[in-house]
């Protein structure tokens, strides 16, 4: 089994969705998460606040500096994620397809490296 990150990309410059659409989106993503759990693929999932709530800690010369805001200045930011465990990339892409349809946002699929595997 291999672990994958399914990262939800969100355009923070887009107009906000209505409360009704947000509730429908949450219901759809909840259903996909329930499917993952039933299939034994789900490891962990989480949603994130907008990037303005982030702090970046940068190392430099043995010390760190802290700045508000995202690491990169882009329209699309990480909005949430699923961590799944499946046999291969093809299975991860099937789940990513379901996630993208459920949340209406692009999903980046990235495998964990072997050094990061849980013990």
Image (tube, rainbow, N blue to C red):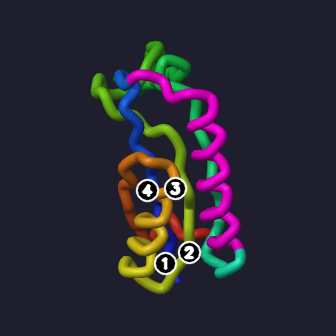
The answer to which of marks 4 and 1 sits earlier in the sequence is 1
* Residue receiving disc 1: 2
* Residue receiving disc 3: 102
Q: Nearer the viewer, residue 58 or 37?
A: 37
Q: From the image, which quarter does the C terminus lie in?
A: bottom right
- Assess whether residue 110 is covered by the magenta stretch: no
Q: Tell me whether the residue at label 4 lies in contact with that at label 3, contact meaning CB atoms closer than 8 angstroms.
A: yes
> For the residues marked 1 and 3, what is the alpha-carbon distance in whole angstroms?
23 Å
* Residue receiving disc 4: 100
Q: Nearer the viewer, residue 72 or 74?
A: 74
Please state the extent of the stretch shown in magenta in the rendering. 15-37
> For the residues marked 2 and 1, what is the alpha-carbon distance in whole angstroms?
5 Å
The answer to which of marks 1 and 3 sits earlier in the sequence is 1
Q: Tell me whether the residue at label 4 lies in contact with that at label 1, contact meaning CB atoms closer than 8 angstroms.
A: no
Q: Is residue 7 left or right of residue 53?
A: left
Which circle, 1 or 3, is nearer the viewer?
Answer: 3
Q: Is residue 8 left or right of residue 75?
A: right
- The residue lying at 61 percent from left, 69 percent from top is 118
């Amino acid at each position: 089994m291999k672990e994958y990150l399914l990262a939800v990309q969100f355009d923070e410059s887009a107009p906000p969705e209505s409360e009704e659409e947000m509730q429908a989106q949450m219901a759809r993503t909840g259903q996909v998460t329930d499917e993952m759990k039933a299939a034994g693929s789900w490891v962990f999932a989480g949603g994130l606040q907008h990037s303005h709530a982030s702090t970046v800690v940068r190392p430099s010369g043995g010390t760190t500096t802290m700045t508000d805001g995202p690491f990169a200045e882009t329209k699309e930011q990480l909005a949430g994620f699923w961590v799944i465990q499946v046999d291969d990339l093809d299975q991860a892409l099937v789940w990513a397809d379901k996630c993208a349809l459920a949340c209406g946002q692009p999903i980046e699929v990235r495998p964990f490296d072997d050094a990061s595997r849980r013990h």
